[in-house]
Amino acid sequence: MRGILEYNSYRKQLLTDLLASFTYIPGTVVHCGYGSLDARIPADGAENPGPRPERLREQKRAFFAKASYLWRL
């Protein structure tokens, strides 16, 4: 199991990645994972003056799976 959180303060984005791996024998492995991109946005819109609280909103997400097998002759 592996998890990565990365915050980009310039773009105000949070990147989340989770990865699970299983190795049956050396060279044979199965990976399953999830990734999402969250961006900071104003909570109440642009029409209200003054400081506005910000919150994260999910922009993109993806699931993936990969399997590899080592063939030996």
Image (tube, helix red, strand yellow):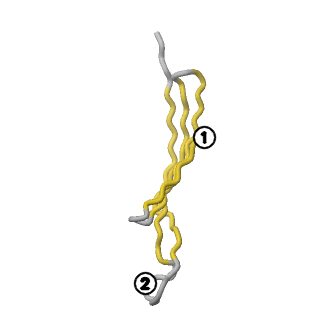
Structural distance between the alpha carbons of marks 1 and 2 = 41 Å
Residue 3 in the image: above or below residue 38: above
41 left or right, relative to 20: left
Numbered disc 1: secondary structure? loop
Counting residues from the start of the chain, the first of labels 1 and 2 encountered is 1
Q: Quadrant of residue 22?
A: top right
Label drawn at residue 46: 2
Q: Are marks 1 and 2 in contact (CB under 8 Å)?
A: no
User: Dot 2: within a 10 Å radius of its alpha carbon, few (fewer than 14), some, or many (20 or more) residues?
Assistant: few
Residue at figure coordinates x 49%, y 20% from the top left: 70
Q: Foreground residue, 9 or 46?
A: 9
- How many numbered dots are placed on residues in this image? 2
Q: Up-down: is 23 above or below 18?
A: above
Q: Position of residue 39 (x, y in %)?
A: 46, 66
In front of the other: 26 or 53: 53
Q: Nearer the viewer, residue 10 or 14?
A: 10
- What's the amino acid at mark 2? Ala
Q: As shown in the figure, which amino acid type bears the numbered disc 1?
A: Met
Instruction: Give how far across and how far down residue 18 sits, in percent.
Output: 55, 47
Q: Is residue 48 above or below residue 59?
A: below
**Which residue position is annotated with label 1?**
1
Q: Classify residue 24 by image quadrant.
A: top right
- Residue farthest to the top, as pictured: 73
